[in-house]
Amino acid sequence: MPDYSDSYSDLMQRALNEDNRAYSELLQKTAQLLRPYLAKRLLFANDVDDVLQEILLSVHKARHTYDGGRPYLPWLYAIARFRLSDYLREHYADDLKHASDIADWENLLPNDVTETAFSYESIRAEVEKLPAKQATILQLMHEQGHTAKEVASLIGMNESAVKVAAHRAYKVLKIRLMP
Amino acid sequence: MNKIDDLIAQLAQHNMPRRAAPPFLISLKWLAYAAAYFLIALLVSGTRPDLAAQFRHGEFLTETMFLLALIVASSVGASYLAFPDVYQKRWLARLPLLLFIVFMLFLLFALRADMPPAPQPLHSWQCTITIMLMAMLPAVSTLWAMRRFAAIQRGMAGSVAVLFAFSVSALWLRLHELNNSISHVIYWHYLPMLIFASVGWWLGKRVLRW
């Protein structure tokens, strides 16, 4: 892998000497460098964009702590890891806060677990109001009977992303359908 | 133009702030402030009457040297921890905690060697409170100064900053209080520093957000 460290350090050095174009170029290159790093660790493109913005803002806020005398990339990745873990911590804390307790569902669960209380047909209208991707996933899983893995290969997502999207769709349906 | 490009265009218009001084200079500044605070406190409170004689005892001298080393190491550690990449010298950030462990081991050996044990002073927890009160100003000002940087190991940074302030305070009390009991200083001077360092961890997580 080529070592880009020097060019980044050089750009930052110029940026610190009030060269705004060098700074802009540095941030562009930083964004290009970090996008695949974040895409590997986050499921959705929106999340990648959000975290990338957070990191760029943090790099901007912390730029006075870089003096050009040491490699740029370890400094940058320290900030990137910090913001990514902050984001993930908040994201999962938020998910846990909104997670439904199994006890809330007990009264709604049918006695015979092989039969569902709802048929897909009865909720089709609500499913169609969901965002297109979620609606497609539910249709493939519940109308056509595909597994999450099969759906993932059919629509070109990974399996976890399909499960997360389905889970979000269930939450929306639960709010809309439950009295 | 997407939102990342917009953001970059906005950020690039800002002026560059003044570069932060290297951590060893920051640490030197903090040490100078701590030294001034320590000397003023000692001038106001006075030293123990047998101080010159105590310095002729190996244990007391070593204990004082350890405290001085802890002050320097924690000041250096805190200044490095204020930088996001710990100035790429992570070992310096861990040095104060390592030194504190060695210091405690030394005190345990000194305790075993303290035969017959020196008499315990009449007071006990008052020393912990005194150290805490004396450490307040340096702790708050160090944490405040660290907020100007960009610590990412915030817990550790808070902990080391508090350890710095408490070491200064503990050294002042050791030179002021007429007391030769090793067990007293272990239980009421130094072990509570660990508890306060944990409070510093908690504080750092909150105060050093950026």
Image (tube, rainbow, N blue to C red):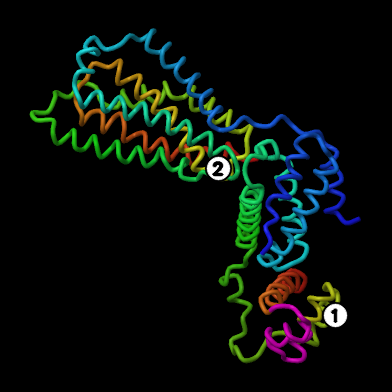
Q: Which residue is mark 1?
A: A125
Is residue A54 covered in magenta? no
Q: Nearer the viewer, mark 2 or mark 1?
A: 2
| Residue visible at 77% across and 58% down in the picture | A32
Front residue of B35/A67: it is A67
Say if residue A115 shows up in the picture. Answer: yes
Do discs 2 and 1 belong to a common subunit?
Answer: no
Q: Residues within 10 Å of mark 1 (few under 14, many from 20)?
A: few
Q: Which residue is mark 2?
A: B86
Amino acid on which the number 2 mark rests in the picture: Val
Q: Residue furthest left?
A: B116
Front residue of B187/B145: it is B145
Q: Position of residue B118 (x, y in %)?
A: 14, 24
Which chain does tag 2 point to?
B
Label 2 sits on a secondary structure element that is helix
How far apart marks 2 and 1 lie (CA) works out to 56 Å
Quadrant hosting residue A162: bottom right
The residues colored magenta run A138-158
Horizontal side, residue B69 vs residue A67: left or right = left
Label 1 sits on a secondary structure element that is helix
Q: Position of residue B173 (x, y in %)?
A: 33, 20
Say if residue A119 shows up in the picture. Answer: no
Is residue A152 covered in magenta? yes
Quadrant hosting residue A173: bottom right
Above or below B105: residue B26:
above
Above or below B58: residue A130:
below
Which chain does tag 1 point to?
A
| Residue visible at 31% across and 29% down in the picture | B189
Q: Work out which quarter of the rendered image holds the N terminus of chain A and state it.
A: bottom right
